[in-house]
Amino acid sequence: MPEAVARANAYVEAGADCVYPIALWEPEALAAFMSDVAGPVNVTRVPQMPSLQEIAAFGVARVSWALALFRQTMAYFEEQLASLRD
């Protein structure tokens, strides 16, 4: 975590609009990361993540749903293709 925070702060100092700690979703880790980063933080929505209200309380700037929607879509396609095969 210390290296990730240092890297995130370096990005912010270099002019990044936000930082994006990919795969960081655990409530305690996310809250700790956000308290030590001097800029907006974006996260990726994953099923294990707390509710949007909970992560909003941490101050998350943005939640990306792209990966979650892609995975749900692919699972649906797999089901449909399997039904054709059967």
Image (spheres, grey):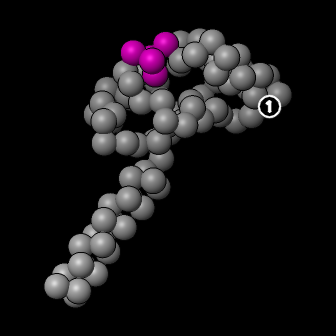
Quarter of the view holding residue 42: top right
Q: Residue furthest right?
A: 14
For the magenta stretch, what is the residue range? 28-32
Q: Is residue 64 left or right of residue 82?
A: right
Task: Give amino acid for label 1.
Answer: Gly
* Residue 80 highlighted magenta (yes or no): no
Helix, strand or loop at label 1? It is loop
At x 38%, y 59%, the residue is 71
Report the quarter where the C terminus lies: bottom left
Task: Give the residue at mark 1.
Answer: 15
Q: Is residue 66 left or right of residue 71?
A: right
Q: Nearer the viewer, residue 46 or 17?
A: 46
At x 33%, y 34%, the residue is 49
Q: Which is the main secondary structure of the residues drawn in magenta?
A: helix
Quarter of the view holding residue 85: bottom left
Q: Nearer the viewer, residue 68 or 52?
A: 68
